[in-house]
Image (spheres, coloured by chain):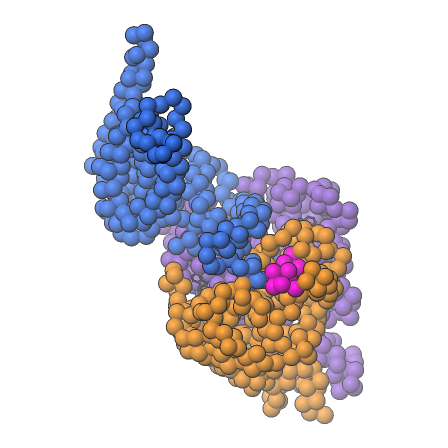
Amino acid sequence: MNLVIDDVGFTYPGGAEALRGVSLRIQGGESIAFIGENGAGKTTLMKHLNGLLKPSRGRVTVDDWDTREHTVAKLAARVGFVFQNPDDQIVERTVIDEVAFGPRRLGQSETDALANSVAALEIVGLSDESRTHPYDLSASQRKLMTLASVLAMRTPVVIFDEPTMGQDARGLKLIGDIVEELKREKRIVLIITHDIDFCSAHFERVVAMADGRVLIDGPTAEVMARADLLATTNVEPPQLVRLAQALGLPVAPLTIDGLIAALPR
Amino acid sequence: MIRLADVTYRYPRATVPALDGLSFEVSTGQFCAVIGANGAGKTTLCSALAGFVPQFYRGTITGSIEVAGLNVVESPLADIAGTVGLVFSNPFNQITGARFTVRDEIAFGLENMAVPVAEMEPRIEEIMRFAGLEGLADRSPFALSGGQQQRLAIASVLVMRPKVVVLDEPTSQLDPVGAKEVFSVLRSLATTAETTVFMAEQKLEWVAAFADRVLVLHQGKLVADGPPGEVLASPDLGRYGLQPTRYTQVARAAQLAGLRSADTPLPVTLEQAVEFFN
Amino acid sequence: MSQSFSLYIPTNSGMHRLHPLTKLALVFLCLVLGLFLPGVWLSYATFALIIIPSALWGGVLPRLLSALFKTALPIALSLFLIQGLFWPGGTPILHLGPLSFKEEGLYFSIQRTGRFIMIIGSFLLLTFTTRPDELMLALNRHGIPNSITYIILSTMQIIPRFQAKANTILDAQRSRGLETEGNVLVRIRALLPLIQPLLLGSIVDIDERAIALEVRAFGRKGPRTSLLTLHDTPAQRIARWLMLLAAVAVIAWGIYLWLAPRFIA
Ligand SMILES: Nc1ncnc2c1ncn2[C@@H]1O[C@H](COP(=O)(O)OP(=O)(O)OP(=O)(O)O)[C@@H](O)[C@H]1O
Ligand SMILES: Nc1ncnc2c1ncn2[C@@H]1O[C@H](COP(=O)(O)OP(=O)(O)OP(=O)(O)O)[C@@H](O)[C@H]1O
Ligand SMILES: [Mg+2]
Ligand SMILES: [Mg+2]
């Protein structure tokens, strides 16, 4: 499975030119964090990958499928998408049905669909809520439920738009673990996040966007070291990198151990 | 400015209270942050300060809450609105739908407060500049990105210049610089305009750098209350489901590794960390 | 577009620039003309002589006709078939094998269709060329309380809001594999799973909006100001009075025509 975004431009019907020529190649097994200022076009770009938006110019292909030639429902077998606003994603009356919605529509057998859904709820720690109405969950739980409902689809590509929004330390760890597990399974994981510390802890490749274009695309440590360029898209490097810079250390550490190791003894 | 006395609140049908015996006071012009794990009661507390708990959500409340001289448990919501500004966390449902451009949406609160038009315009321009919404004045409020909608929600409340601003995780969708700017604007409102700021947040780095005071909620109870340097460096933080800033973590790791003396107080901000390591 | 939650079509025609109350008076007069006088053709005449030229002036005629066509055609067809063929004891005038169209039924259908076209047409004319917030303000200025004008505003927004919500839910469903694109059959099948989340989602929205409004002091009593400005002219003011007088006269005439035969008998 690989994704190719080829010189994609997109303008919303209202007039906003949200993408101005984006090109990216994503190989099977790769995981990428998308960062950048509000309105940079991150959500718009991701919606092109599951076909919710079709490029005004350029081409998006998911393996051998041009997204323009396939329905969203068909693309859903390959690309699972968790929306930025969890309330935009609620279609069923109980948490378990909500999570099983995708698996059932994608043609999994009822036993598989349920098994996958139960497993996904377990992963996000919501097993006790499977009979609850989605609207009765708290906002942070609702976000976790939407993660589960896409995990249960078991798609080769998974996209999370702002998964860590409103999560506490436990939620962050949980989502971090999910990302690590998906990476182990060699699935393509794409996330959009403003949590730069989360991004640098779990992703090896980062794409920073600004004003409908790709500003920087590269290995996380390299991207994070370019504070001045990141500043143009309203991003500050992670806390550890800023500390290392403030201390005049010649490294851009992404872990605590990395910084400790770089401290003068 | 804010005074809670033994406040206990239960949502309808809930078995355990969401707020449990809360008592504290916040003085005029203070920037007070409240932190806590998911479900700790932050949102409930914010709603209570603006009267929506219990007036909108029903349920049962005991104790008293006074904000800016109003008994917010009983005063009509319409009287509270101009005095206590509430920004809630999900930006997607804070747009009134009564106005059709970003500028008019910001003006809506001012219109309802009968602010003269001549005064309205400069206030709107100023707030749009601060919120980074300049280019979007004539856009439909619904045709915005998540972060832009959140900026609009904050701007629409701040423009009303409430005496007390209550914000529930107002930066959840903002880009990193945007989030920091919101904190810094609130800081200056508190310092120069004597606005009392009460904010629920997860971004501890900015809480540490900008707030005067931090409250920690845990299962509806107030479990810590003090200046950021004290509360955020406390080893108890983990027990309440919170993670200290990287600065604190790395300093603690350095102490454990024997690289720094164990009695130096732990840093919570970047400046303190630089001092700690130098 | 539907994003703005109103049917308003923003162009800058003379019709658009009229004071909202002038347009309201015009529409009121149309409704009165079409509804209060007996006879078949008056509503058609109102439509042809007032609504069409006004829509043309406002540059919204094609949109108005297409919206009207979509709503009126099915209704007109069923009226003609059911009432025309099955009017009890009517005079047959056209034979179709064993069935026949009855004169009274056709007469009735022509009349109802005319009224329908005229009512929907004037509603569309008003909403296409009038910003809802300006209409609200104009009514406020004439002593109609905020709570009532707000209901009018919400009513004008019901259709676009439902559309937007439905699109959100369809996006959520097709992103998880429910086929919603394709031929008529596929789309009809996608309707059923849409209804329940649409209703629930709309109720939740209403609740959240109530809070959003309250926070902005919407419930506050007393005077208000407005950033919007309305342009009025003495000519329009006179025209409004004339239209109102005409409407009252038509109503009186209609009542007279209705009562007269009864008194004589
Ligand atoms: N529905 C819409 N209609 C019109 N314009 C839109 C719409 N949604 C987004 N935009 C505009 O398109 C641009 C890109 O928006 P997008 O949502 O992709 O940004 P983003 O990078 O995801 O930002 P954020 O971090 O705030 O979520 C912005 O300028 C935004 O105002
Ligand atoms: N509308 C509601 N009805 C019933 N119970 C509720 C409601 N809203 C919240 N609760 C419950 O009240 C408690 C406190 O929730 P609250 O939303 O205030 O926490 P929070 O600290 O804001 O959490 P988060 O970080 O997830 O936003 C939780 O146990 C929650 O389940
Ligand atoms: Mg986005
Ligand atoms: Mg909350």
Q: Residue reaching furthest bottom?
A: A265
Q: Main secondary structure of the magenta part?
A: helix
Looking at this view, is A19 or A250 the one in front?
A: A19
Tell which chain the image draws in purple.
B
Q: Quadrant of the N terminus of chain C?
A: bottom left
Tell which chain the image draws in orange.
A
Vertical relation: C228 (above or below) A199: above
Looking at this view, is B101 or A113 the one in front?
A: A113
Residue found at x 69% / y 92%: A264
Vertical relation: B181 (above or below) C238: below
Q: Which residues are the magenta region? A: A98-108
Residue found at x 70% / y 73%: A177
* Chain C as rendered: colour: blue
Position of residue B201 measured from the top left corner of the image (x, y, whole percent) = 63, 62
Position of residue B178 measured from the top left corner of the image (x, y, whole percent) = 52, 68
Residue C73 found in image quarter: top left
Q: Quadrant of the C terminus of chain C?
A: top left
Res B127 seen here: no
- Number of residue marks: 0
